[in-house]
Image (cartoon, rainbow, N blue to C red):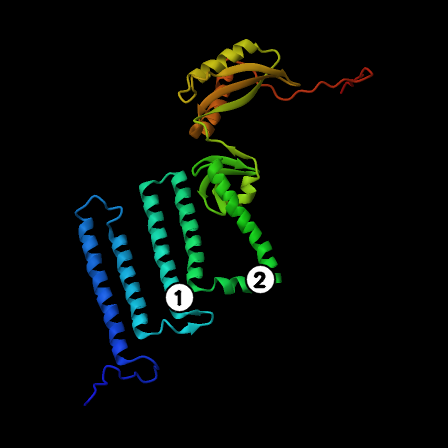
Amino acid sequence: MAVNTTATLPIPFVPGITLESLLKALLTVVILAFLGEVTKKGIIRASKETDLTWILNEDTAELIFRLFVLGGIIGALYALGVMKYTLGPTTIGNLAFAVGFFYISYLIAKKSKDYLLQTKRGPEDIIKAKLFYYLFVTVTFFLALSFAGVMGELGALLAAAGITGIVLGFSSRTVVANFISGIFMYFDKPLQIGDAVQVGDVQGVVEDIRILSTRIRTWDGTLVRIPNEMLFNSNIVNLQRYPVRRVDVSVGIAYAEDAGRAIEAILKTLDEMPLVLAEPEPKVYVENLGDSSVVLRVWAWAPSERWFDVRTEVVRRIKEALDREGIEIPFPQRVNWFANELKVKLEDE
């Protein structure tokens, strides 16, 4: 009786792989790629007829297509019988599953982050999306290592390399400290993206808050990166946390001038400025008697986002008002006293 051996004909130079297994592997890839393409087109077509575009869109269609292709590749490897081959402490099957698991998890995390940033663009939402993304990817990475069967060997390797572990621990201490500080700052919320802040000698607007660092654009247009650990341990002055902020100006007038008339002129000027708030009301009072002038203190409240503009306008208008009233803003003066009477001799030319 004749036996058909065509289906089990071995492939030259590839031991253990037959023509039958090769055809099965190829057919698996083709079928799953075809199903993925059909599903992709169906999702794109459905996205044009539904309001659920946050999930039914081209990105989701591409994600599903990649999952089908990945499944076809893994299925083809199983059909070829190479998944059982050992590779060090693990098998190719375990590695393939771990890589596929991490890749799918990464795509899901990225898709979820993009969705969160698309629906809500507030500073708090951006931080939430980034925290979710990094935590999800980190957890799935270690799960993938566990699925690959290399966690035990990895732990033994790190335990054996004690000196290397100590060096790595010291080198990563700053990274971990910045990461934890970033999480604490998220719950503490001392600043948000877009706030005008002062951190030590750095003043500017918060451009971005990341897991390890915060970026501030200073008033002169430069970018300053501050590690979150340093930021968390610093005194943070938020210049825009509240909707209104006080403008504080000191003005000196001559001792010969009427302080009451100067105060009335300044208050009238403040009342004429539209960006100076009526509540809390402006205040002008005599702060102290200086060496060269009577020092008046001016308080005026303004919207926080317009504070600088209001302050410069207040100084300019106060100067103009005092000039109109003929009230002198004196130069610094000194009185020199001599123990003995000075005698000046005048000679005729």
Between 203 and 34, the residue placed more toward the observer is: 34
Residue 115 vs residue 227: left or right?
left
Image spot of residue 61 (x, y percent): 25, 55
Within 10 Å of disc 2 (Cα), the crowding (few <14, some 14-19, many 20+) is few
For the residue labelled by badge 2, is the local secondary structure a helix, a strand or a loop? helix
Within 10 Å of disc 1 (Cα), the crowding (few <14, some 14-19, many 20+) is many
Question: Label 1 sits on what residue type?
Answer: Asn
Quadrant in the picture for the C terminus: top right
The residue furthest bottom is: 1
Mark 2 or mark 1, earlier in chain: 1
Q: Is residue 220 visible?
A: no
The answer to whether 125 is drawn above or below residue 48 in the figure is above
Residue 180 vs residue 274: left or right?
right
Residue at 45%, 35% (x, y): give it: 195
Q: Which residue is mark 2?
A: 159
Between 279 and 149, the residue placed more toward the observer is: 149
Quadrant in the picture for the N terminus: bottom left
Between 44 and 192, the residue placed more toward the observer is: 44
For the residue labelled by badge 1, is the local secondary structure a helix, a strand or a loop? helix
The answer to whether 75 is drawn above or below residue 306 in the figure is below
Residue 40: mark in rendering: none
Q: Which of the 4 image quarters holds residue 253?
A: top right
Image spot of residue 34 (x, y percent): 21, 64
The answer to whether 198 is drawn above or below residue 75 in the figure is above
Question: Label 2 sits on what residue type?
Answer: Ala
Image spot of residue 190 (x, y percent): 49, 35
Between 169 and 53, the residue placed more toward the observer is: 169
Image spot of residue 236 (x, y percent): 53, 35
Q: Report how far apart the C-alphas of labels 2 and 1 lie in the structure.
A: 24 Å
The residue furthest front is: 1
Q: Which residue is mark 1?
A: 94
